[in-house]
Amino acid sequence: MTPPSPATARTLDVPGARLYYEVRGTGPLVVLVGAPMDATSFAPLADLLAGDYAVLTTDPRGINRSPVDDPDQDSTPQMRADDLSRLLTHLDAGPAAVLGSSGGAVSVLALAQAHPEQVHTVIAHEPPLIELLPDRAERHAGNEDVIAKWLAGDHAGSWRAFLDNANIHLPEGVFEAMFAREPDPQAIADTSYQNTHMLRPTTHWQPDITALRSAAIRAVVGIGETSASQLCDRTSRALATALGTEPTMFPGGHTGFAEDPDGFATRLRSVLREG
């Protein structure tokens, strides 16, 4: 296999923000989307795919290298979908296969609804669509606790509340290790933006199931093999049921693309070939 070409980094001005994005490789276009995860989080996976695909990654608005004009404005899935649409138009690329993970999965679902002509395959990996759950009020209340603790300056307590609400259990000692080292200022800034301006609009967003089912788009719902019983396992299964599809399992957990990029790339290639 030919080694992938280095990533080309550029920026694009969009309404209210300047988006940082990277393109690497050649071939059919694959877009990797996170929220709040940035382009760096997807770099190992993107490098693995770039031998056969042109791969687009980006920092979502308000995160890391994508500054916003108004830091007090919320980042909604609709806004992030519009950003992705403008990137695709700017690159004169598409229709594309788009994979979104976590909040990025919500972004790509919103893109598929608003601009179906720009997408041929949408892979929603563990979208936190709390509105699809019977215990939505309790889960939303859990996120409000995450936000309140963060705003009060209790960062460790906020993270613990987030993990509890998501039903994610870290191995012994991992949580303590997260707070044993000097915090990274960029990570603090990104988490602050996520908790105060992304978490609420992302988890309250409701997909238009009729629109997603009627569009000429292949919709795949991805779940991590180790995510059983977690919040996003439940929301993903609820979405798959609503769409009338079976979920597709991927290696790892909620961030399997970063935990096991090799295994994730192998599974993703298989999913893309099936389309």
Image (cartoon, rainbow, N blue to C red):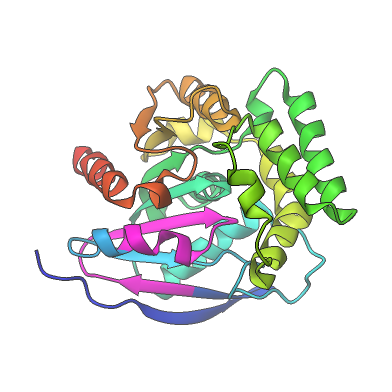
Q: Above or below — where is 228 with respect to 220?
A: above
The residue shown at (78%, 70%) is 71
The answer to whether residue 222 is left or right of residue 180 is left
37 in magenta: yes
Q: Which x, y percent locates residue 146? A: 79, 43
The residue shown at (70%, 53%) is 198
- Magenta span: 21-46
Q: Is residue 94 visible?
A: no
The residue shown at (28%, 78%) is 6
Q: Which x, y percent locates residue 74? A: 76, 58
Q: Is residue 252 visible?
A: yes
Q: Which x, y percent locates residue 112? A: 47, 47
Of residues 67 and 257, the one nearer the viewer is: 257
Q: Quadrant of the N terminus?
A: bottom left
User: Residue lying furthest right in this view?
Assistant: 152
Q: Quadrant of the C terminus?
A: top left
221 in magenta: no
The answer to whether residue 43 is left or right of residue 159 is left
Of residues 258 and 273, the one nearer the viewer is: 258
Q: Above or below — where is 207 with respect to 18?
A: above
Q: Quadrant of residue 250?
A: top left
The residue shown at (21%, 40%) is 270
